[in-house]
Amino acid sequence: MSNSLFQHTQTAHCESGVISNLLGHYGLQISEPMAFGIGAGIFFGHLPFVKVNGVPGTTYRIWPGAIFQRVCKRLGVRMESEKFSTPEKGMQALDKVIAAGIPVGLQSSVYYLPYFPPSYRFHFNAHNLVVYGKEDGQYLVSDPVMDTVTTIDPESLEQARFAKGFPAPKGKMYYPVHVPPTASFEKPIKAGIEQACHFMLKVPIPMFGVKGIRFLAKRVANYAENPGDRKATLYLGNIIRMQEEIGTGGAGFRFLYAAFLQEAATLLKKDELSKLAGELTQTGDLWRNFAFAAGRVCKSRSADNVSYKELSEMLFQCAASEEAFFKKLAQVKL
Amino acid sequence: MKKEEVPQDSDNLHEGTFKQIMYAVDNSGNYVQVQSAGWEPENIALDQAWEEVNERVKAARARVEAGEISPVAYYMEKTLMDLPLLASYVGKFQWQVKRHMKPGVFKRLPQKMLLRYADAFKVSLTDLLQVK
């Protein structure tokens, strides 16, 4: 039943990792950074009115599922994707597909995945993993952010797939039905870069893209008054976690995108991209400095006005650096 | 970030079992994958998030014992849910769930509703009725 070999590779981010692993299974080799870049995964958004447990949301990437859709469209991969009205139907459908030897991507909640360390298990519903078989009543799992393959019991998997909340996975499962044996990456790379520049520079909403970083910076400057010290440290903590933590989809997206540019530079023989990759690495380091300073403020549990101002200043620098970077990237003739 | 700069700040929270991948630059300037055992700011943020959870659980527990709120409110904190999430798990409106957090209302809840809460919190009916 489960003798289909599945090549598991650990990656930094679940969505681009699942794409890389699933397509690789069908002989279409695409690295994680390449998937992230073609899918235009890089982004920024700060949404003060979308609160989880009373803390406003921050994201460093495009919304869940978008990378997947874009990569498939750009590479000519056809996916079968289904959601289910009841857990029973969802689990039956999964059993049927893996019995045919097809590895299946699943959207799931992190909270119900027993193989994660307990400290990471929050109600985060946009995690992705691959189930590639069933053995002795246990599902065989290739979770891209895990070191190696693992297993999960049917009950936990069902809970993870049918978790409530936003975004509700509703048992979503997906698998390729047509993968071209080879694909030219040139056009997809170009489309991906264009789209990323558009989303970072041109979306006319103040919470998104480079504008969104400045929007956050302005709010951080006032954190001492609004929401006040105690809550401010929680807000800051969340900004850090979204930037770095697995599961929530953090993991240094700036470095991931820089790795993509480097790979693209070699493929397209464009030195400019490689140079820009170096610039983005520096931006990534600015973000890390910010996280480091913010972590210090969290640890001391309070900050005087000055340190919030300093943090805000650091965010303005990140914004300026990203703006300069994406403007140059948009200029590159591909 | 250079390869040597990839943080290896292990933390007890992750029980030292979990390594994540990061992308960093090697000596010749090429990006490579490097495993990281964790990073201080992230550990602080995660620690802090759990501290907040534990405080809320403790406070809720004291209030259940004082007869101010029902176990529904306690288990909601314990399972890291908020009101909208819990409401969608038990298939009720938020104001209804809020009402069920009153001890008087909770006492009169039908068995069927109690079972739904027990199911949402993944606890037995006995545990739901009696916060240990």
Image (cartoon, helix red, strand yellow):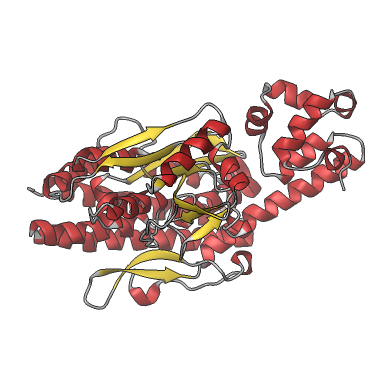
- Percent x, y of residue A140: 49, 55
Judge left or right: residue A257 versus residue B97: left
Q: Is residue A271 visible?
A: yes
Q: Is residue A128 left or right of residue A269?
A: right
Count of marks overlaid on the render: 0
Horizontal side of B77 relative to A27 (left or right) equals: right
- Residue B49 x %, y %: 63, 53
The residue positioned 15% from the left and 49% from the top of the image is A183
Tell me: A74 left or right of A56.
Answer: left
Q: Quadrant of the N terminus of chain B?
A: bottom left
Q: Is residue B131 above or below residue B37?
A: above
Looking at the picture, tell me which residue is in the foreground, A148 or A224.
A148
| Residue drawn where x is 20% and y is 61% of the image | A262
Residue A25: percent from left, percent from top: 30, 54
Residue in the foreground of this view, choosing between A143 and B39: A143
The image quadrant of residue B115 is top right
**Rendered view: B67 above or below A33:** above
Residue A223 image offset from top left, x and y in percent:
55, 45
Residue A276 appears in the figure: no
The residue at the point 84 percent across, 34 percent down is: B70
Furthest residue toward right: B66
